Image (spheres, rainbow, N blue to C red):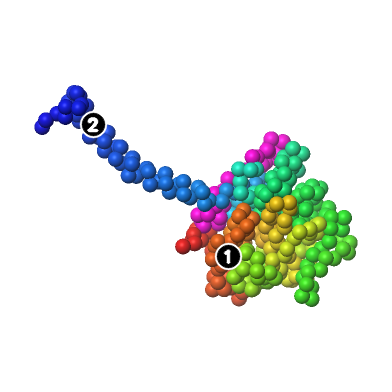
Amino acid sequence: MKTPSLFHLGADKLIALPQTLLSVILTLTIVAPLCAESEKSSKEMIRVLLIDGQNNHDWKACSPTMINILEATERFKIERATVLKEEVANFSPSWTNYDAVLTNYNGLPWTEETKSTFEAYIKGGGNLVVVHAADNSFPDWKEYNRMIGLGGWGGRNEKDGPYVYWKNGAFLRDDSPGKGGAHGKPLEYKVVVRDTDHPITKGLPLEFLQAKEELYDRLRGPAENMEILATALATGGSERHEPVLMTITYGKGRIFHTVMGHDAKSMRGVAFQETLIRGTEWAATGEVTFPPVTSEDLPVDRAASRHPDEIKPPE
Ligand code: ZN
């Protein structure tokens, strides 16, 4: 075989050359499409910061469950900030790196600096998802309570705002005195959609059953710029039709607040999962691209449950 005149190489290099070429070809054929793919998905992925680390609920089990639920859709990329008590003083995230913040945090107040940067982030068009006991947090942080609309416990009462519930075909703001935040015994509860036009609830069954868990009632708060998308009758509790899914506007920020999600088991409820997915996408982008789940998967005569691994990305 004739040695190519271009390369004045020794015999060992001649052997090495084809391997080098092979590796270049492999790199081009395998790595290049992967790069293109990851560039494509990183554009479409919604970046979410999940905050936990303190809660009167089992955040160690609940947070991974929510991460699994959201990431199973292949639409969200979740980063997790676990803020233990001793880490609160140093908690200072770069909020603007995220399309939305999901709070599963019910703990010590953040520093004044962090509260202030968070307020600026939401006001400026950052977005927030509030799950279950996260609405117990920060009773004395006025701006946080404006973001969540309604909250419970922590000394909340009539000084914090009205009770809000559905009565005789309309939402009632009830200023009567009393403590904010209660629940009856855990139950499977029927969620009733009250706003069928909102992207989060549009196309969903009008009624569906959530897995057994405690249902918050008698929450109180400023309830400004708040829309209640769905309610549930707090049987054995307030006996009122209590807000279950809410949206709030704070400055340019969108907030989705769900009272569902007491524990990892009830987070297997399809009702919790579908509304979390839709609500998080809406908070982050202002729209919902997920096709609405039908009454076959989200029925009213049984509390449908599934492992997050069974969640499939939309086709
Ligand atoms: Zn709970």
Image height of 251 relative to 177, above or below: above
Q: Please tell me in which quadrant of the rendered image residue 92 appears.
A: top right
- Per the image, label 1 sits on a secondary structure element best described as helix
Q: Range of the magenta residues? A: 67-94
Residue in view at x 30 percent, y 41 percent? 26
- Residue 17, numbered label: 2
Residue in view at x 70 percent, y 70 percent? 194
The x and y percentages for residue 290 are 54, 62
Q: Is residue 229 left or right of residue 315?
A: right
Extreme-right residue of the structure: 177
Crowding around mark 1 (Cα neighbors within 10 Å: few <14, some 14 to 19, many 20+) is many
* 91 magenta-colored: yes
Q: Nearer the viewer, residue 1 or 152?
A: 1
- Per the image, label 2 sits on a secondary structure element best described as helix
Badge 1 is on which residue? 270
Report the amino acid beneath label 2: Leu
The x and y percentages for residue 227 are 73, 63
In the image, is the residue at mark 2 within 8 Å of ligand 1 by its beta carbon?
A: no
Extreme-front residue of the structure: 6
| CA gap, disc 2 and disc 1 | 57 Å
Report the amino acid beneath label 1: Val
